[in-house]
Image (spheres, helix red, strand yellow):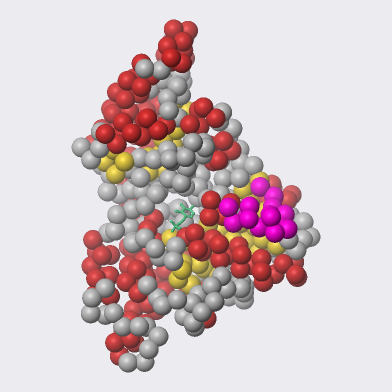
Amino acid sequence: MFVYADNAATTKIDPEVLKVMLPFLKENFGNPSTFYSKGREVSLAIEHAREQVAQAIGAKPSEIYFTSCGTESDNWAIRGIASRYTEKRGKHIITTNIEHHAVLHTLKAMEKEGYEVTYLPVDREGFISPHQVEDAIRPDTLLITVMTANNEIGSVQPIVEIGKIARAHKVLFHTDAVQAVGHIPVNVEEMQVDLLSLSAHKFCAPKGIGALYIRKGVLPNNLLQGGGQERGKRPGTENTAAIVGMGAAIEKAVRTMEQNTAKISVLRDRLIAGIMNNIPYCIRNTPTHDMLPGTVNISVRYIEGESLLLLLDMNGICASSGSACASGSLDPSHVLLALGLPHETAHGSVRFSLNHENTIEQVDYIIQTMQSITTRLRDMSPLWENVSKESSFQEKEPVVL
Ligand SMILES: *Cc1c(COP(=O)(O)O)cnc(C)c1O
């Protein structure tokens, strides 16, 4: 059986989305910035996609700017606000210690340039509280940047409450909503965010296209200099086919969200219970409330995550260890360490991210495969030999759902 369970890393393009894209890779190739009709058709299609994206997050079309990816949107939001408002507001930025590297590495680079960053620590389940944000605000705070949903464990932050605090203190607020858009309801008015990053390949559109929502009146400087595209704010000839695909995909994701969430969360809970109840010495890293519908992260103690992934792959299952960026490197995931897991435990972690294409049969196959390969790997581990001698499996607490 083949099971793709790595949808938090990227998704397959929806066939309906591909269909609306294809004309823009063939006959509708005109440059949207020109005046002849071949170009105008294309620019109308881009504006239609802009409306679709705006509508999906409760924004106005004029507040949506297409970028090349979620990473660019994060970089633009943070760098653009810093270069525009530092003089007036200061050099202090508030964030969390579980952000995506697109945010964390940007902030790390800015610390070397004289910015001061407060990294709010998350609790054992991966949440920060609004009070932590409020306590961290200073007179020189320039920006708060807190992700809506975490890509490794699926925790969803209290963005509405944080938005209220940011607004009350007149501090600009950015959220990386790349994992949230298309999966849970996102509304920029309810959240009171000033900037919001999104990326199309996380909701069944192609890779290499993203967007940044910028609230009217907020004026980040450009990241790129060049032509007049995207109302002068994001130069570069538009990736028309991808933009059109992003519009169609976000519209469909929002339209089918309720039905998909119902289906996917049942699969998620079945997968978690199946692993926790059948494999001893596992630790659930996905929170028990305020979580994404499809993200499952579990540490399997006394096992190397890399060997686990390898054997899963040999059995046709695509999963990932913590974050895609972290797999292949020997550093354990910064998110799992932030939850308080010891290094060895963080190392033996696996993330399954499900979407509406996954089935119950696939989930049961993952559970069964996890059982057999965990037994196999532990049988070869000297650490496990001591553990299994000393204690009985009854120690574990059964998961009741
Ligand atoms: C995937 C992801 C990104 C990066 O998006 P790209 O389009 O791949 O650059 C940023 N933040 C989060 C939370 C993500 O999951």
Q: Is residue 280 left or right of residue 344?
A: left
Q: Position of residue 17 (x, y in %)?
A: 28, 65
Residue stretch rendered in magenta on the structure: 105-119
Q: Is residue 401 left or right of residue 224?
A: left
Q: Position of residue 295 (x, y in %)?
A: 41, 43
Q: Is residue 88 above or below residue 148?
A: below
Q: Quadrant of residue 33?
A: bottom left
Residue furthest to the top: 389
Could you tell me which quadrant the N terminus lies in?
A: top left
Name which residue lies at 36% across and 22% down. 377
Name which residue lies at 36% across and 30% down. 308
Q: Is residue 279 visible?
A: yes
Residue furthest to the left: 1
Q: Is residue 380 left or right of residue 123?
A: left
Q: Is residue 277 above or below residue 151?
A: above
Q: Is residue 92 visible?
A: no
Q: Position of residue 152 (x, y in %)?
A: 47, 43
Q: Is residue 34 above or below residue 337?
A: below
